[in-house]
Amino acid sequence: MRLRRVISSVLLLALTSAAQGETGPVLVIHGGAGVIRSSMTPAIEADVRKALRNALQAGYAKLESGQPALEAVAAAVVVLENDPNFNAGKGAVFAHDGKNKLDASIMDGKSRRAGAIAGVETVRNPILLARAVMEESPFVMLAGKGAEDFAKQAGITLVQPSYFRTERRWQQLQKALADEKNPQASTDGGTHKHFGTVGALALDKQGNLAAGTSTGGMTNKRYDRIGDSPVIGAGTYADGHCAVSATGWGEFYIRTVAAHSICMRVELLKQPLAEAAEYVINKDIPTLGGDGGAIALGADGTIAMPFNTDGMFRGWVAGDGVVHVAIYPDEDESGE
Ligand code: ASP
């Protein structure tokens, strides 16, 4: 029987500003819940922490200067997409056919406008295309060639597919293909869950929320499989009270409508954000056989970051402007 470690890393921040009845800007990010502790090296850890800090600084600068939550989300996600350590943008995993097929979505809490794209192969920053779909088209979700045609029209930066080729991800695909032929020899149970999806949530000075998520999906995916990340309500959701970005085994996040479920538990069941996120991520999804994590942010500045894997790359900046990053569950989640 498979041993499942259910680890909860939940953080509640009762912001001073929130207690005073004001909302201070808050930014929360993740770089995926696919951390395998035994395969981490000090060099990778240092690199990832640096990238998380850079993303937080890029996004928080927008919030501090009074820009909307959506701007901060896009800015933070772009930094993570450009970093090969994460399974999004530059570091996207390979599909079965040896191609990188990227998915992303973004949502504005106040208006509940949303944009999403799936299966694009030449878009450097998928989060920017998702945003263009939201702002410049009458649609919410575009896929494949149509999404790329729209990207051209919208003036989104395109790259050759080879831009996304990294040796590390290529070797992960080779291993997945080899394990498929010889499952007994697999050293990781054949899971190949490189959950390095990235996401960001922001609460701006006006008290509005936004959420965004970007991914290469799952290694060795076939048949143009699409996971939860571009599915509004599953991998990404934001409304006036709550914002969520998820990372994990996408099929289970779609089946539980994970991001929306967390927010509805808060709104309709009046559950505290941490309790709602804990239930969906660490109870409902594992009960069905899935795993992963999520970040959640309330309009009062409350943050929750549950996960049930070895670790989740994550970071946040709240009203005091201090940058925090963490990877493992037992880590001191204090500022650096
Ligand atoms: N949720 C993503 C997917 O299933 C994978 C991840 O989180 O890394 O496509």
Image (cartoon, grey):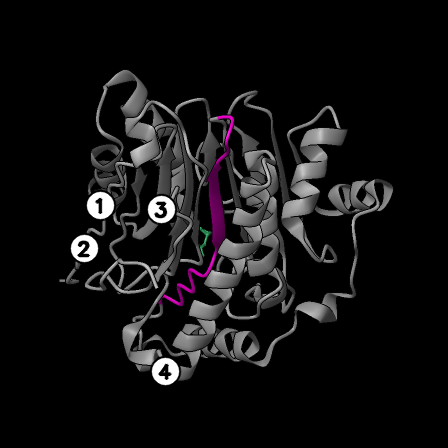
N-term-proximal mark, 1 vs 4:
4
Query: Which span is picked out in magenta?
Result: 191-206
Residue 313 in the image: x percent, y percent? Answer: 38, 61
- The amino acid pointed to by label 3 is Ala
Q: Secondary structure at mark 3?
A: strand
**Residue 235 located left or right of residue 69:** left
Residue 120 in the image: x percent, y percent? Answer: 69, 52
Q: Which mark is residue 7?
A: 2
Residue on which the image places disc 3: 294
Say which of 323 and 314 sits in front.
Answer: 323
N-term-proximal mark, 4 vs 3:
4
Residue 108 visible, this angle: yes
What distance separates the C-alpha of mark 1 from that of mark 4? 28 Å
- The amino acid pointed to by label 2 is Ile
- The amino acid pointed to by label 4 is Pro
Residue on which the image places disc 4: 42
Q: Is residue 141 above or below residue 191?
A: above
Marks 2 & 4, CB-CB < 8 Å contact: no
- The amino acid pointed to by label 1 is Asn
Residue appearing at x 18%, y 55% in the figure: 7
Q: How would you rate the neighbour count of disc 1 (Cα within 10 Å): few for under 14, some for 14-19, many for 20 or more?
A: many
